Image (tube, rainbow, N blue to C red):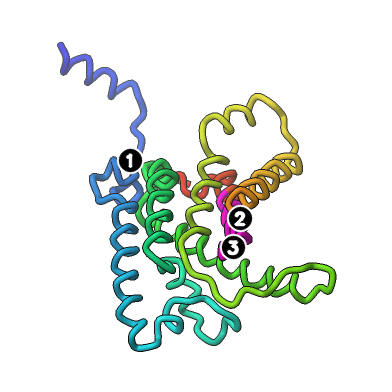
Amino acid sequence: MVRRSRSRTQSSTPRRSTPGAGERPPAAAGSPSPILELLVVFVLVFVVQGVTAFAGVMGTLFVLAPPLSANPWTIVTSVYAHSGFGHLLSNSLALLVFGWPVARATTRLRFHVFFAIAGAIAGVAQLVLTGTLAALPIVPVAPTAGVLGASGAVFALLGYLVASNRLSTGLASLVDVPNWLSALVFVGLAVALTLATASPGVAVLAHFAGFLVGALAGRARVLAVGS
């Protein structure tokens, strides 16, 4: 009886192609979580930072500093480096909270690429924006000498989570919200979170840029499997 019923269902329903293992979320494909992989990378890079600090080359390898053309690899390596154990711990906890829901809805490759690109954009934005604002005589902002850390990428995950979750998507489908209003809401959220995390030594503009990048990506659902 069960086999007959299943046979009729298959014959009356058109077959659909299923995505390959590379296009399945990590939980579905049975592959290691990209969150755990990132945590391992964080720890390994932190150890390497300690070793290279004795040789006096840690900044050259991991600190993103102007001009960007001097050590261009730091645009990426700085995303995985941290200034101390407390910095590493706080970013790791935030990654677990905000990254896990995003990672479960996408593939490992997409998650890692998004994390690296969003973090790089956030770091570059910190240098460029502070440098631009410092050139204005009426703005009391000092240019950033160097930046490192995964905070910008973590804020991008938070922005993606806010913009792509079922609640925000459902509200957008029920209420005709203009694009300019949606953008204004995301900017307002980015400003609020930036001010909430502001403290000496924190790259607040990297947080701001990271959240906006994540919100835009979440709105476009760039990490959705099959897109």
> The magenta stretch spans which residues?
199-214
Of 180 and 186, the residue lying toward us: 186
Q: CA distance from mark 1 to mark 3?
A: 50 Å
Residue for point 72% across, 29% down: 176
Amino acid type of the residue that numbered disc 1 sits on in the rendered structure: Thr
Q: Position of residue 59 (x, y in %)?
A: 45, 81
Label 3 sits on what residue type? Pro
Q: Which is closer to the viewer, label 2 or label 1?
A: 2
Residue 49 vertical position relative to residue 201 in the rendered view, above or below: below
User: Considering the numbered disc 1 on the image, is that residue within a helix, a strand or a loop?
Assistant: loop
Q: Which mark is residue 144?
A: none
* Depth order, front residue of 68/196: 196
* Dot 1 alpha-carbon crowd within 10 angstroms: few under 14, some 14 to 19, many 20 or more: few
Q: Residue at x 34, y 82 (%)?
A: 52
Read off the residue under disc 3.
200
Q: Position of residue 5 (x, y in %)?
A: 22, 14
Query: Taking 106 as reference, is 195 left or right?
Result: right
| Crowd band around label 2 with a 10 angstrom C-alpha radius: few (<14), some (14–19), many (20+) | some
Contact (Cβ within 8 Å) of mark 1 with mark 3: no
Q: Which residue is denoted by mark 2 in the rendering?
A: 198
Nearer to us of marks 1 and 3 is 3
Crowd around label 3: few <14 · some 14–19 · many ≥20 (10 Å)? few
Q: Residue at x 57, y 33 (%)?
A: 169
Nearest to N terminus: mark 2 or mark 1: 1
- For marks 3 and 2, give the CA distance: 7 Å
